[in-house]
Image (cartoon, helix red, strand yellow):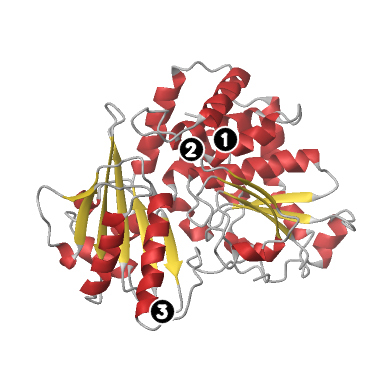
Amino acid sequence: MTFPRFPRQMCFLRFLAQARGTLGRHLADASPVAWAAAPDVTGRKLHLVMGNESCDLDSAVSAVTLAFVYAQRHREHDYVPILNIPRRDYPLKTEVGHLFVKCGIAEPVLLFRDDIPREVVQDVNVILVDHHVSPLAPNVTEILDHRPLEDSSPSFKQLPTRCQLDIDASVGSCASLVAQRYFAEDQPRSTGVAQLLHATIVLDTINFAPAAKRYGPKDEAMVQKLESELNYGVAQRSSLFDELVAARADISKLTLTEVLRKDMKVLQTDRQVVPLAGMPILVRDFVEKSGAEKAVREFGVESNLLVILGMYVSPADGQVLRDLALISLSGQSQFVERVRQALLESNEPKLELRPHEVETRFMGGCFLRQHNVQATRKHILPIVKRALLEWEADHGCDCDEVYFFKEKPQLGLS
């Protein structure tokens, strides 16, 4: 089922359909035909609006909606949304694809990280949404994010002094920060933008479940304003949430390796590459599947440590269950133990990790049930990062730079 089309929505869809042509006008190697067909862009600045490299629903929606809002308000410049993954990985983002199709957004109109050639203009501006650590830091002019501040990161310190920061860890969804921008002025108004923002906030806040505590006053205020604009009732949230949870958990067309890559971030230093996989099922359930060990070995090739985070949301009552696994393919048990202890001893937040009731010896890994279901990957990742750097310092490594990219974007700007 798709949302009905309204005239206000068509303007948003046209913007996305024209994004590739907009980008083409700014490419140094544009063909003579493209240049002849394009209007004069002298003086126009290109702004790339980029989500994070996991490209979850919050990241993808924040990028496309903010780019549209700014493009309508600042017509003297060009704004192009970029999904920060290779195009080949888009089918892994099942909930993104589901909601985009429902809103009339087809995959061919979207721009991905590998659509940006090295020859992109050197004075491009970058707006980051749903992350604030990026190798593109010198070109970043604005940041909207709800992750804990990583102000000690070398790339964060490279941000220009003119960069505008809106980093608010009290909100459950970056889409709430975009919604604030959307409502800050009377125009533009778009049914499609409102639908995307509304659905994303509902999913990210676990439908405002009190037990999950994944929302703040700003999330509540924005979703109410969006519902008022869309003429939605509060009762519609539950069915929408269930639909999106089901889409996110639909791994029926994915291989087990793709399930691990579906929502992945990578911690990388000069000596260590640690992928963190987020899955829409519990890790204990995943490792019971036929072919799980082969998938883990493919996923973790050239890595000393794998961190796998599982989450299951009950379709009956919305109850959230979480667990995690630490696996070393190279048998570095001391390294695994160091990270395990860091997670167990964490007090900010306290993860409340305990062994599963039934022990598993899958690949010699460490498997723990996470009883503090309010703690998410954005809380766990910095703990692993600190343990990683402490381990390297103790073993003679003087590196302290961590990139949250599996591979640096090929933008010619790093």
Q: Characterize the local packing of mark 1: few (<14), some (14-19) or many (20 or more) Cα atoms within 10 angstroms.
A: many
Q: What kind of residue is marked 1?
A: Ser
Q: What kind of residue is marked 2?
A: Gly
Judged left or right of residue 248, residue 115 is right
Judged left or right of residue 276, residue 88 is right
Judged left or right of residue 117, residue 201 is left
Quadrant of image for the C terminus: bottom right
Please name the residue that numbered disc 3 is placed on.
Answer: 271
Q: What kind of residue is marked 3?
A: Arg
Is 274 drawn above or below residue 289 in the view shown? below
Please name the residue that numbered disc 1 is placed on.
Answer: 176
Judged left or right of residue 99, residue 323 is left
Q: Could you say where residue 339 lies in the image, as x and y percent from the top left?
A: 30, 64
Is 311 drawn above or below residue 265 in the view shown? above
Q: Could you say where residue 66 lies in the image, as x and y percent from the top left?
A: 66, 42
Q: Could you say where residue 192 lies in the image, as x and y percent from the top left?
A: 62, 31
